[in-house]
Image (cartoon, rainbow, N blue to C red):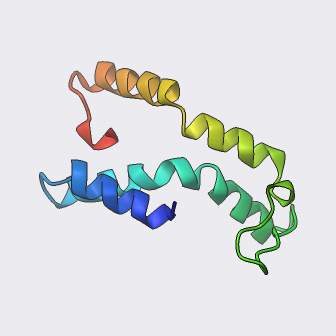
């Protein structure tokens, strides 16, 4: 799924209170993909890894480093989300609905 659409869906669904709520939900919606594919992009820009071959559309999974797959699994985990949601709830003493 497109990274920007994650942010927009999150912002529209959970960030309607005010402008700051919208942008917070937008950034949180981007976070799961940025924390996996953003790391790959940063590594490519810094010359730490080779850019996957996009010449035929989507690159073969074998050209994407294994650590990106692991990061993707962690950042898209319901259990990780639930732990983060409950931890933030306990710190703020209220649920942060923009995390939805």
Residue 56 sits in quarter: bottom right
Residue 88 sits in quarter: top left
> Which residue sits at x=31%, y=40%?
100
Say which of 73 and 49 sits in front.
73
Looking at the picture, how far across and down is residue 44, in whole percent? 79, 67
The answer to whether 39 appears left or right of 52 in the picture is left
The residue positioned farthest toward the left in the image shown: 17
> Which residue sits at x=79%, y=56%?
61
Looking at the picture, how far across and down is residue 1, in whole percent? 52, 60
The answer to whether 93 appears left or right of 5 in the picture is left
Say which of 72 and 46 sits in front.
72
The answer to whether 61 appears left or right of 20 in the picture is right
Looking at the picture, how far across and down is residue 95, in whole percent? 24, 28
Q: Tell me if residue 24 can be seen.
A: no
> Which residue sits at x=76%, y=75%?
54
| Depicted 29 relative to depicted 52: above or below | above
> Which residue sits at x=61%, y=34%?
74
Please count the marks in the image: 0
| Depicted 63 relative to depicted 76: above or below | below
Q: Tell me if residue 21 can be seen.
A: yes
Looking at the picture, how far across and down is residue 84, in whole percent? 44, 28
Say which of 58 and 39 sits in front.
58
The residue positioned farthest toward the bottom in the image shown: 55
């Amino acid at each position: 799924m497109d990274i920007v659409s994650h942010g927009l869906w999150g912002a529209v669904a959970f960030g309607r209170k005010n402008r700051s709520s919208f942008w917070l939900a937008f950034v949180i919606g981007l976070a799961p993909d940025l924390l996996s594919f953003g790391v790959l992009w940063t590594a490519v820009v810094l010359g730490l890894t080779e850019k996957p071959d996009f010449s035929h559309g989507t690159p073969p999974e074998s050209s994407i480093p294994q650590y990106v797959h692991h990061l993707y699994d962690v950042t898209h985990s319901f259990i990780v989300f639930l732990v983060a949601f409950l931890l933030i709830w306990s710190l703020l003493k209220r649920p942060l609905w923009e995390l939805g």
